[in-house]
Each structure stands twice: as structure tokens, then as C-alpha cells.
């Protein structure tokens, strides 16, 4: 016996709003990762707070690796948010 359970409009609305709320929270996390991990070090480099010279090569490599990590984290969080939105029902 295969019964299709149809959701009421109220249940559908609750489901969709819950998914949108989760997607929004993941998207905010992605924007935060991008801001903290990429824009902040770039701003420090452009304003001179993080000097770029040969005497700090190890630190510069660590900052670059950190920026790459944050970019990957932001990208993954954004893709999770997109997956949530694909679950919306009409």
C-alpha cells in the first residue's frame, strides 16, 4: 500500500520557511568567513598593517594558507545553503 501523504498549505509553508532560515544562517556563515578570512588580511596588507617583505616570508605564507582555507570554508557553506534551497516544495 502506497499512500501519498499530501501536506497542507500550512505544513508546506512551515517546511519552506524552515529551509530558508537554515539556508540564510549558512549563507551568513559564508559571508562571515569571507570577510574575516579574506577581506581583513587584504585590508591589512593594503593599509600597511601587515607589511609584505622578505623578512616575514613564513608569516606571509601562513596568512596566504589561512586565506585559502577561509575561501574554501566560505565556498562550502555557500554550497550547503544552496542545497537547502533546492529542497523547497511548491
Image (tube, helix red, strand yellow):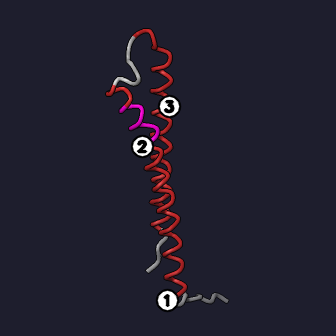
Q: Which callout, 2 or 3, points at the residue further toward the start of the chain?
A: 2
Check disc 1 and report its element: helix, strand or loop.
helix
Q: Quadrant of the N terminus?
A: bottom right
Q: CA distance from mark 3 to mark 1?
A: 46 Å
Q: How many marks?
A: 3
* Mark 3 lies on residue: 66
Q: What SS does tag 3 mark? A: helix
Q: Nearer the viewer, residue 55 or 83?
A: 55
Q: Which mark is residue 35?
A: 2
The quarter holding residue 60 reads top left
Compared to 36, does 85 lie above or below?
A: below
**Could you tell me what secondary structure mostly forms the magenta stretch?**
helix
Residue plotted at (45% across, 60% down): 82
Along the horizontal axis of the image, is 3 left or right of 54? right
Q: CA distance from mark 1 to mark 2?
A: 38 Å
Quadrant position of the C terminus in the picture: bottom left
Q: Helix or strand or loop: what does disc 2 sit on?
A: helix
Labels 2, 3: front one: 2
In this rendering, the answer to whether 55 lies above or below 65 is: above
Residue displayed at 38% across by 13% down: 53
Amino acid at each position: 500500500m502506497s499512500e501519498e501523504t499530501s501536506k497542507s498549505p500550512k505544513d508546506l509553508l512551515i517546511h519552506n520557511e524552515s529551509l530558508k532560515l537554515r539556508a540564510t544562517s549558512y549563507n551568513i556563515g559564508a559571508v562571515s568567513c569571507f570577510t574575516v578570512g579574506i577581506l581583513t588580511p587584504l585590508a591589512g596588507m593594503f593599509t600597511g598593517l601587515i607589511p609584505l617583505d622578505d623578512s616575514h616570508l613564513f608569516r606571509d605564507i601562513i596568512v596566504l594558507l589561512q586565506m585559502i582555507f577561509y575561501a574554501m570554508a566560505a565556498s562550502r557553506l555557500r554550497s550547503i545553503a544552496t542545497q537547502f534551497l533546492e529542497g523547497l516544495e511548491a
